[in-house]
Amino acid sequence: MVIIKSHTRQPYAVNKGRMSFQSPLGGKGIAPSNTSAAPRAFLLIFVAVVLGVVILWKGLDDDPQRASSDALSSSGQMTQIADEQPADLPPLNVPEIATIAVETTTTTSPPPLPTRPPSDVKVLVLNGSGVGGAAGAVTNLLKPHGYTTLSPANGNKDEKSWIYYKPEFSPDAKGVTDILGIMPDLLTSFPTNGLPVPEGSIDRVSTANVIVFLGSDKEIYGS
């Protein structure tokens, strides 16, 4: 019969922070020691901190260099742009505008001759219309306006009616047309070779300043 002896496991012994145990062989075994582990942990932490500082310094050192390089590059480009002179542009072909001097001419019409008082104007009515009493009727129309009317007389028969005037009596003759209500286009100056009239009317024709000639067209007086 074999008798097996059981060995009783010795408990761990704690001695002031140092952990150990007894081996089954009765000797003291080696257990982990806090005293030897702490320096290794501090060493690892120190190495990690140093590596972190080195990496951080490396990164910070690279950024200023890159920023400085970018700043120098931008400055160089700006200097190059400032130094470049603009290219000479071709001259613009601007057509010349010719200036034309315009002469302004002012037409001044002579001032109208002043009209005389009607009493200073001698008016003669000649009847060439063939209508009896026509010259007397027109003479009676002019008398109330103050004209000096000569005795009406007969003229040579003619188709066209006219109002003759001496050059200096043009405004006065216009006044006669206004009274008779006829158009001023019947006004005309005395003929240079004289007005043909019967012999009995010559003296009165030479005396008159304005002569109203009644033609057969009845432009001035019609029956």
Image: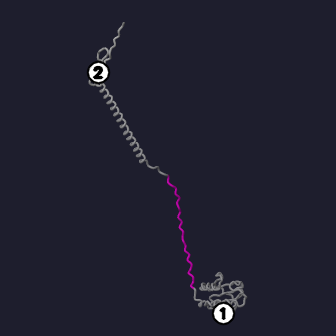
Q: Is residue 102 magenta?
A: yes
Label 1 sits on what residue type?
Ser
Q: Circle 2 is placed at which residue position?
A: 13
In the image, residue 142 above or below residue 71: below
Residue 187 on image: x %, y %: 64, 83
| Foreground pick, 150 / 197 | 150
Quadrant of image for the N terminus: top left
Instruction: Specify the segment rendered in magenta.
Output: 90-114
220 falls in the magenta region: no
Which mark, by number, is residue 42? none
Figure check: 8 above or below 132 = above
Seen at 66% across and 93% down, the residue is: 151
Quadrant placement of the C terminus: bottom right
Residue 159 x %, y %:
71, 84
Q: Nearer the viewer, residue 8 or 21?
A: 8
Secondary element at image label 2 = strand
Residue corresponding to mark 1: 151
Q: Nearest the camera: 161 or 41?
A: 41
Residue at 52 percent across and 57 percent down: it is 94
Mark 1 → mark 2, Cα distance in angstroms: 182 Å
Residue shown at 72% from the left, 88% from the top: 131
